[in-house]
Amino acid sequence: MYQKIPESTLNLIKSNHDILDIVGEHVQLRKQGRNYFGLCPFHGENSPSFSVAPDKQIFHCFGCGAGGNVFTFMMDIEGLTFLEAAKVLADKANIPLDVDVETVAKNQQHYDPYFEAHELMKKLYHHVLLNTTHGQEALDYLLERGFTEEIIKKFQLGYAFDSWDYATNFLDKRGFKPALMEQAGVLVQSEAGDFFDRFRNRVMFPIFDQKGKTIAFSGRALGDEKPKYLNSPETAIFNKRKTLYNFQHARPHIRNSNIAILFEGFADVIAADRAGVENGVATMGTAVTSEHLQVLKRTASQVIICFDGDNAGIEAARKTADIILQAGLQVRVCTMPEGYDPDQYIKEYGGEKFRREVIDAAHSFASFKMFYHRRGRNFAIEAEKMSYIELMLQEIAKLHDRVEREFYLKQISEEFGLLLQTLTGETNKIMGQYKRKENADTERLSADIFVAEKKLKVGYQIAEENLLSFMLHDRHMAELIKEQLAGQPLNFPTHQAILEMLFAYYDEGNQEDSSLFINYLEDPQLRKIVTEIEMKALQTSPSEKEVTDCITQVHLYHLEKQRKQKEYELGEAERLLDFSLAQQIGKEIIEIKKKLGNSIRRG
């Protein structure tokens, strides 16, 4: 990976990008001390644990452990290979990079038969729909529902033959073993052991990953067959909790508008796209998950929910709005006329009215909650009115923006003739309760982390991390430490692996640059460790005593391990009545103890 691009070119690419600018395109950062902090884009959190160090040009999350430099951030946030990330960054800086990313990627990886089979089936289904008499009924059905040929091609819709073995034979003839295709989710195996097609006589909606690779299908029955929609099972390449339908098309539009529109189904997404709303996505028949929201948080700060106008759709929108707000995203909610879904609304009223009166008119979180909690209430009954006000104060207390809170409190004050000061006081009390609970949870978490670190990060581990930090910043210091270790490996295998890679990096003539060294490490776990060490490192040169103390800690632990091993061997020798061996081991233990004593005195 590293050897494909010269170190000088990588250094040039890196020097033309400030990691703050690249990370800032995806994460809202605030300065605290010399570093910047924000909510981690790689896992759900309410308190910022994601840190960027501009002086070191690295990032690290103290919550999930993600870390690296500008290259690894692009790899993680966009799902790119190293070469792809380097190419993207080089293009941004107008630096010529003579690397054929696609050719290298194909040479480096074995082509996954799951992806290849899904790609073949997508093309087959699409061809059958548009170019054969077998697909005419399905094509007529789609055209009657308002799908155009342009939309059918854009979303690569298709048709699965009304056959039990067409796909099975098609794939088998091309070398795809049925057992493997059953694991891929394309075929099904009967109890008798026979294989048959999973999808039959259905309009096929291919599902793509973020890179645009086909990873699954959803088939809509043409007749009365149940279920109405049949989805691929979860496989090694398809996870419903992480997959958003149409994200590969919607991503640039989401990024440009900073808004994602969340629909309930595929037909709604496609109808909205046809109506000019191109930033729409849908979940795979599941409730929205934290994984879905992490995908969206990388490109948007706001999500608009556009579900069906029936009771089930409104209830689902309420639950989804709470989840989205809790994830740290702004949320708005569309209210469809009762009995309509977005697809039906667009067919009847057209795309312009849908954009203007549904999407653009979406309620804010608090406004939607007012609408939701009003349903079925009789405000002539005092208890009903008080219950509504109490519920709304709970909802308004969740809002992060003070102006927004005051706006809705004023509405309640004017509607029900209550003092704004009283409502504000009650809301502040509720917010205090929320805050105390959050603080208590944070304190418990911090205490757990402190105890865990105290147990795990014993003296020799901290000493080894310090030595690695010293060596990362000073090649001459690295050589001196190597001499003083006198061939003794570090006690943690990952630390020893980093040590060996660091000297290989230096031997190739590379400079002391921890951010560039991260590129040299192919193992993601080693990258994380180096990043964590660097985030904690001070910018001052260590004293001779600090270095000596760290090396002493490493030696002491090594000797302690030797002593314990010899004491175990001594016990075994005595159990076997081998007194000669026991005497020899006893002498060795005495020698180890002497070395321990000398090391302690020198320390």
Image (tube, rainbow, N blue to C red):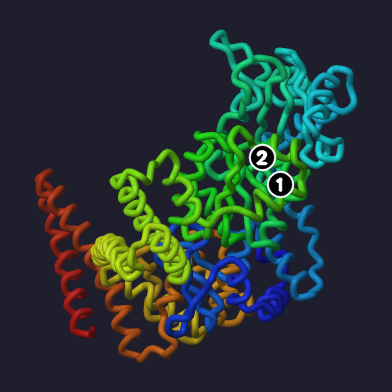
Residue 104: x and y in percent read 75, 55
> What is the CA distance from the residue labelled 1 to the residue labelled 2?
8 Å
Task: Judge by depth and name the residue closer to the eye, 602 or 131.
Answer: 131
Horizontal relation, residue 508 to residue 457: left or right:
right
On the image, the x and y values in percent for residue 314 come to 51, 40
Residue at left offset 71%, top offset 51%:
355
Q: Is residue 305 above or below residue 214?
A: below
At 77% across and 33% down in the image, what residue appears? 157
- Amino acid type for the residue under numbered disc 2: Pro
Q: Measuring 63% from the left and 26% from the top, which residue is drawn there?
A: 229
Q: Callout 1 environment at 10 Å: few (<14), some (14 to 19), or many (20+)?
A: many
Q: Which residue is mark 1?
A: 354
Q: Earlier in the sequence, mark 1 or mark 2?
A: 2
Name the residue nearer the viewer: 307 or 380.
380
Choose top left, top right, bottom left or bottom right for residue 600. Answer: bottom left
Residue 267 in the image: above or below residue 553: above
Q: In the visual, does 207 lie left or right of 428?
A: right
Q: Quadrant of residue 161?
A: top right
- Which mark, residue 342? 2
Query: Residue 61: in sight, yes or no?
Result: no
As helix, strand or loop, the secondary structure at mark 1 comes to helix
Q: Is residue 141 left or right of residue 309?
A: right
Give yes or no for contact between labels 1 and 2 (Cβ–Cβ under 8 Å): yes
